[in-house]
Amino acid sequence: MTTEEVVNELQSIKNLLAASQFGENQLWNAQQCADYLGLTRAYALRTVMKNKSFPQPFEIEGINALRWNACEVMQYAVKHRVNVTN
């Protein structure tokens, strides 16, 4: 196993541990998703969040805003090897 592979595996473990600290129903707005992914909100919305493999958002009645399941976003980051800032 190369050093890069070890670093990637450790990052994956770190992300999974971070995800376990959130309840299954923890929801993030677009800014929180972007912050976790280390991207600007505008860039995340324009590119990553439009990708069909990115978790689907929830539309919450009454607040007219989209939310994403935090655990799903973290799992996406692990699966797609996005370098997170945490």
Image (spheres, rainbow, N blue to C red):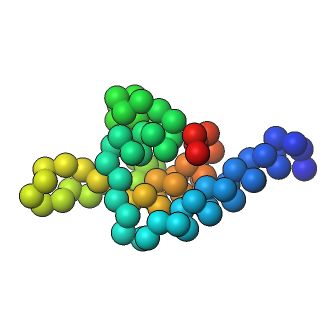
The C terminus: image quadrant? top right
Q: Residue furthest bottom?
A: 24
The number of discs equals: 0
Residue 24's place in the image compared with 28, above or below, is below
Q: Residue at x 35, y 53 (%)?
A: 28
Q: Nearer the viewer, residue 55 or 7?
A: 7
Image position, residue 75 (x, y; %): 54, 57
Residue 66's place in the image compared with 44, above or below, is below
Horizontal side of 34 relative to 29 (left or right) equals right
Q: Nearer the viewer, residue 51 or 57?
A: 57
Residue 47's place in the image compared with 5, above or below, is above
Image position, residue 35 (x, y; %): 45, 40
Q: Nearer the viewer, residue 73 or 19?
A: 19
Image position, residue 7 (x, y; %): 78, 46
- Whether residue 79 appears in this view of the structure is yes
- Whether residue 47 appears in this view of the structure is no
Horizontal side of 80 relative to 29 (left or right) equals right
Q: Residue at x 55, y 49 (%)?
A: 77
Q: Quadrant of residue 47?
A: top left
Q: Residue at x 43, y 70 (%)?
A: 23
Image position, residue 56 (x, y; %): 34, 54
Q: Residue at x 66, y 56 (%)?
A: 14
